[in-house]
Image (cartoon, rainbow, N blue to C red):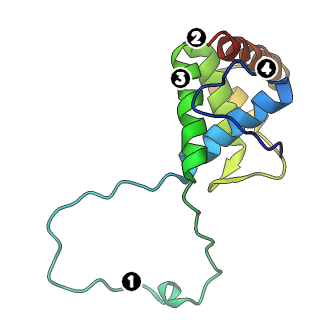
Amino acid sequence: MIALTMKYHFDGRFFSEEEFYEIAMEAARTIVRLPSQKIGGYKPAWPEYLPDLMGYGYNAEYVRKMPPTSKEIDRLDGFIDIMWKSQPVDVRIVMAVAFSAQKNGWPKSRGPAWTKVGRVVGLSKDALKTRFNASLERLRVVAMSM
């Protein structure tokens, strides 16, 4: 993974295609790792109990997601600024591919699920890869113009 020293805005730095790909993947990873919102309200007087034996530790371990660091959230904020200034179609394609490359906040070893995203978007795998690269390049151009 490429280490990035990106601040809130990109400070006119030129990124290569690989670096900007990593920025998009890190943005999706950061969004997935954000803590979920819990709805407040009344709680029952009964204590919570686990409904079955699998709830008592007789199953496989679950690895918790680490919450994102403040630097990752700052970089996500900068990437969101880029997304607001880009075309919605480009953002949808880039983020759909980026989210398909994540599993519980960790990158998948096999990369994005091109076929699944292609079915959702309505494109073949090869056409999706071409559109993704073009969309990523357009987002990169928007980032350079900021």
First reached walking from the N terminus: tag 4 or tag 2: 4
In this rendered view, identify the residue nearer to me: 110 or 52: 110
Say which of marks 4 and 2 sits in front.
4
First reached walking from the N terminus: tag 4 or tag 3: 4
Residue 27 placement, left or right of 44: right
First reached walking from the N terminus: tag 1 or tag 3: 1
Q: Which residue shows up at 77% across the image and 51% down it?
A: 108
SS of the residue under disc 3 = helix
Corner quadrant of residue 78: top right
- Distance from the alpha carbon under mark 2 to that under mark 1: 47 Å
Is residue 47 depicted above or below 115 in this figure? below
Say which of marks 4 and 1 sits in front.
4
Residue under pointer 3: 81
Residue under pointer 4: 14
In this rendered view, identify the residue nearer to me: 104 or 7: 7
- Distance from the alpha carbon under mark 4 to that under mark 2: 20 Å
**Label pair 1/3, CB-CB below 8 angstroms:** no
Residue under pointer 1: 51
Quadrant in which the C terminus appears: top right
Q: Position of residue 89 (x, y in %)?
A: 60, 14
Q: Position of residue 14 (x, y in %)?
A: 79, 20
First reached walking from the N terminus: tag 4 or tag 1: 4
- Distance from the alpha carbon under mark 2 to that under mark 3: 12 Å
**Label pair 4/3, CB-CB below 8 angstroms:** no
SS of the residue under disc 1 = loop
